[in-house]
Image (spheres, helix red, strand yellow):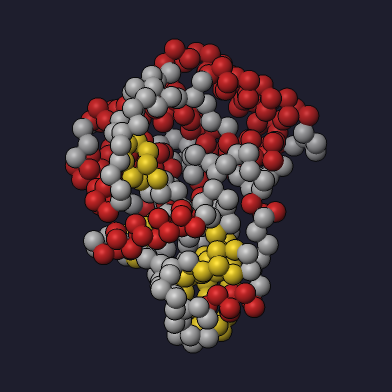
Amino acid sequence: MTESQFTSTAVVLEGPDAGAPPVGTLSPPVSRFVLARVLRGYRAGRLIEAHPVAEGLLNRGYRVTSSAGVYFLKCYVDRATATLPAITAQHRATTALYAQGLPIAPPLVGRDGQTVTDCDGRRFALFPWVPGSHRTGSELSLVQCEELGALLGNVHGALARVCAPVVQPGRQPTADPRATAALLDELLERARRHRPHGPFDQLAERRLTERAALLEAYAHRRPGPEAAGPAGWVHGDFHGLNLLYRGERVVAVLDWDRLGVRPRGEEAVRAATLIFNDPVTGELDLARVRRYARGYREAADAPAQELAAAAHRVWWERLNDFWMLRWRYQRADQRADQLFPAAAAQTVWWCQEYEQVLDAFVN
């Protein structure tokens, strides 16, 4: 396991609650005393040392070495995902997926028979430390791309077997371009008035002005509320920083904080836009996307029209999404700033190459 394992939310398209206070103000480092106290709740030996892993946007994590071995200790922070029912559901699902042979690192059971530990006003869970490393989409062969798509399809299928049955939600509204326009105007004004006014603010101004023109041009292509594909249980944050490789294969799918019911095809599309994008231009490697989508469709038994509808809805979502700028200008939280240039560029590129992107997902 690398130092960045379990810190996945760095590149998620659907950002964490944009209205919440910055996580950093809510998650002071966990003291060694508390870490040792939590560890004593497991049959995991005596704490020797602990090092924080790179913090994600939601939670804190520590690489813990004890007299019994090496572990990952997770501190749940985000208010939307740190509730006991949410964590318990995640742990129950991942334990069941592991039992079905999928590459999952399940939580360890404490001395009290539970997988969640309350200590010092926060919740913790202990996981095995899985050796491995992250891979970018460009590092994957075409065969590996297809295998990755199949893995996600198999995850969706397994979740359907181990989680509660899903009642299809029916109509699912999409972003209203009028509401988006109002938010866009607010963010543009905040960007212009931001001090000190630097290169990022100038880029934000340019991209917001550009996005306003795109929204006007494409408003008529808003997906209808009935256009969503089948909903099911999904990982919720499937991308490269949540995939751990050893050799040529994925050995662990990480960070299940966003487990939930959503259109399955949309997760497949979002994942591709995160894994196979150029880190500077945001452009997608459509050859790799094509093989990945082929693997997903076959494993998930998903028809091409399901991926077509999903690609259109995700495209519309991205066109109306400004969570990174909301964090900066509404929350004074700049941790997502580095993600904005490529994400904004990808939206423009996707509008220009819409038909080619769609073809990659369906053929």
Asked whether the viewer can see residue 69, the reply is no
Residue 122 x/y as whole percent: 59, 63
Quadrant where the N terminus is found in the figure: bottom left
| Residue 261 sits above or below residue 51 on the image | above
Residue placed at 30% from the left, 27% from the top? 308
In the image: residue 348, left or right of residue 234: right
Judging depth in this view, the residue of 244 and 39 nearest the camera is 39
Residue 234 x/y as whole percent: 35, 45
Q: Within the image, what quadrant is residue 119 found in?
A: bottom right
Residue placed at 37% from the left, 52% from the top? 139
Residue 346 x/y as whole percent: 48, 33
| Residue 177 sits above or below residue 201 on the image | above
Residue placed at 43% from the left, 24% from the top? 173
Q: Within the image, what quadrant is residue 340 found in?
A: top right
Judging depth in this view, the residue of 230 and 291 nearest the camera is 230
Residue placed at 54% from the left, 48% from the top? 80
In the image: residue 62, left or right of residue 270: right
| Residue 32 sits above or below residue 299 on the image | below
| Residue 84 sits above or below residue 297 on the image | below
The total number of labels drawn is 0
Quadrant where the C terminus is found in the figure: top left
Residue 306 x/y as whole percent: 27, 30
Asked whether the viewer can see residue 99, the reply is yes
